[in-house]
Image (cartoon, helix red, strand yellow):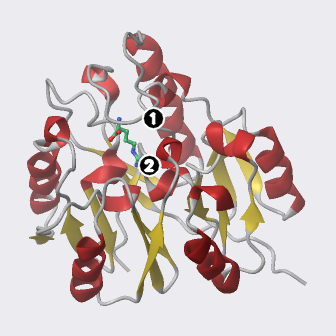
Amino acid sequence: MPSIPVARPRRYLLCEPRHFDVRYTINPWMADGVEVDRERALAQWRVLVDTYGRLGHAVETVDPVVDLPDMVFAANGAVVMGGRVLGSRFHAPQRQPEAAAFQAWFKDAGFDVHEPESTCEGEGDLVPVGRFLLAGTGFRTVPTAHQEAQEFLGVPTISLRLVDPYFYHLDTALFALDDENVAYYPDAFSPGSREVLRGLYPDAIIATREDALAFGLNSVSDGRHVIVAPRATGLIAQLSGRGYVPVPVDLSELHKAGGGAKCCTQEVRTA
Ligand code: ARG
């Protein structure tokens, strides 16, 4: 019998989309000429923040910086495990200045930040699942950053290769349901990486391409409640079937930049 999903209170870091925009194209979602409704983005983001509060999670925010329109995607700013903060080194020049802004927030909050030497986009590609760190590569974070993460964080780090540009970050193709299990979209991964995932997580929730394209896998789970894109209807049904509580939050404006709920959410894991 699978155990009943239990929530654990979390500490989240987010960044208000005050300067959010689509001004350059660094992933296939950021089509040229896409128009962003910033007020709508702000309203959707506030629902996300309120939802975390209602579920009993602590939310902190880092000040958004003018001319950094992607800074709302706070997950990319670092990865934190056991109070150790691995900072980021962004792939795209347009996003590179974000690293210092996130680093400054962590320093103010009392954390030391380890700066990676290789391209490394935080929780976008580095997804903690219990004792392991799943590490994506192929589009942004490079394999040498996986080694740096393992050395610095001291957790077994498992490299996975992404092959579909629509799922350019690991957190667009996979999320942690709890410390033991994940949901993912197999075709986003190379054959070898698919085999690794099958072996590690035989009971994983397998998502369809449709649900993955709706950013259903860019979800945030507290172990019980899963903040999920409302259009990922198949995934929502699967989550309910396993005893999780899907909490749909619509972030369609942020989707235009290739991001969803998880991209907006950095988890500060101090334990
Ligand atoms: N426009 C941003 C980029 O391409 C979106 C980042 C989404 N973040 C994420 N964690 N997947 O870098």
Check the image and report above or below for 188 versus 4. Answer: above
The residue identified by callout 1 is: 258
Residue 227 at least partly seen: yes
State left or right for residue 1 relative to residue 96: right
For image coordinates 47% across by 58% down, the residue present is 170
The residues bearing labels 2 and 1 have C-alpha atoms spaced at a distance of 9 Å
Identify the image quadrant of the N terminus: bottom right
Spot occupied by residue 233 in the image (x, y as percentages of width and height):
80, 39
Spot occupied by residue 74 in the image (x, y as percentages of width and height):
32, 46
User: Is the CB–ligand 1 distance for label 1 below 8 Å?
Assistant: yes
For image coordinates 26% across by 37% down, the residue present is 71
Q: Are marks 2 and 1 in contact (CB under 8 Å)?
A: yes
For image coordinates 23% across by 88% down, the residue present is 151
Identify the image quadrant of the C terminus: bottom left
State left or right for residue 94 relative to residue 52: left
Spot occupied by residue 162 in the image (x, y as percentages of width and height):
48, 60
> What type is the residue that disc 2 sits on?
Tyr
Residue 221 at least partly seen: no
> What type is the residue that disc 1 sits on?
Gly
Asked which quadrant contains residue 186, the reply is bottom right
Circle 2 Cα neighbour tier, 10 Å, few/some/many (<14 / 14–19 / ≥20): many
The residue identified by callout 2 is: 168
Check the image and report above or below for 88 versus 259. Answer: below
Closer to us: 75 or 10:
75
Callout 2: helix, strand or loop? loop
2 vs 1, front mark: 2
Check the image and report above or below for 183 versus 237. Answer: below
User: Is the CB–ligand 1 distance for label 2 below 8 Å?
Assistant: yes
Closer to us: 80 or 60:
80
Check the image and report above or below for 94 versus 182. Answer: above
State left or right for residue 78 relative to residue 200: left
Callout 1: helix, strand or loop? loop
